[in-house]
Image: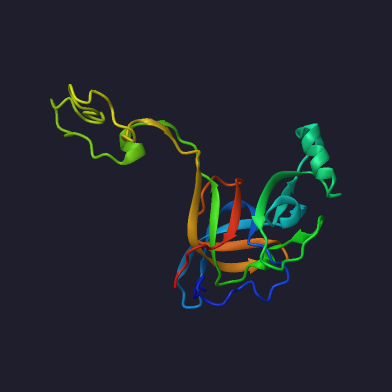
Amino acid sequence: MGARGCMDPDPYEDRETMVSALLGKKLGMTRIFTDDGHWVPVTVLQAGPATVMQVKTKERDGYEAAQLGFDDAKTRLLNKPALGHQAKAGESVKRQLREVAIAPGGQLKQGDEIRVDIFAAGDLVDIAGTTKGKGFAGVHKRHHFKGGPATHGSNFHRAPGSIGQSADPSKVVKGKRLPGRMGGVRCTVQNLEVVRVDLEKNLLIVRGAVPGANGAYVEIKKCLKGTK
């Protein structure tokens, strides 16, 4: 399962659709076995199909991009401006809308369908999603502080300890690691290897973990850094 680095020849060059990303949904984690008998932890994603809801052009909008829609939604869940915007594409309304870059010379129009075949086994991808929300957490859980002695009588176990100076400057500096809300933020995991692509079921299987809970929406993008 050798990964194809981003510095190698463009893996999208010979593919029909010239877009840089695809919308998807995290289905869960499992493991698969390699030919030599080793098992690999993988995440299964439903990648597309995504519909082109709008095309941005340099002449009209100042840049080139495509707005993709993913996952059908009920019309009662959207307000009138959103319904009017999506009606221009002539497709069913979508839960998720995201803009993705178009490769130079890419030809797309409203209503086109982007499928998982823009990726192939061996590609490296960046996957962005919202991490699991864990509520209010202390410094042990949130920042992995060591804490005080566990023996009797110390009276200092899981507290954060001193958080500021005395008379000067008499304040807590910005960025101090303290208890607070943990999780529920946007996170991108880079350079995940595509292990397998199921064109029939629109499934993308990547090696490693992906942000978010099962059922969470993710953006699967062509890797920005990768291996040289």
Q: Work out whether 26 lies above or below 177.
A: below
Of residue 78 and residue 10, the one placed in the foreground of this image is 10
- Residue 44 quadrant: bottom right
Which residue is at 62% across, 62% downward?
Answer: 204
Q: Is residue 57 visible?
A: no
Of residue 212 and residue 16, the one placed in the foreground of this image is 16
Can you say which quadrant of the picture contains the C terminus? bottom left
Left or right side of 113 for 34: left
Which residue is at 18% across, 23% downward?
Answer: 166
Residue 100: image x %, image y %? 65, 55
Q: Work out whether 10 lies above or below 73.
A: below
Of residue 2 and residue 98, the one placed in the foreground of this image is 98
Residue 215: image x %, image y %? 61, 46
Q: How is the image coloured?
A: rainbow
Residue 24: image x %, image y %? 64, 53
Q: Is residue 141 visible?
A: yes
Q: Residue furthest right?
A: 90
Q: Work out whether 80 lies above or below 187.
A: above
- Residue 66 quadrant: bottom right
Of residue 50 and residue 134, the one placed in the foreground of this image is 50
Residue 218: image x %, image y %? 60, 50
Give the tally of numbered discs.
Answer: 0
Which residue is at 71% across, 68% downward?
Answer: 105
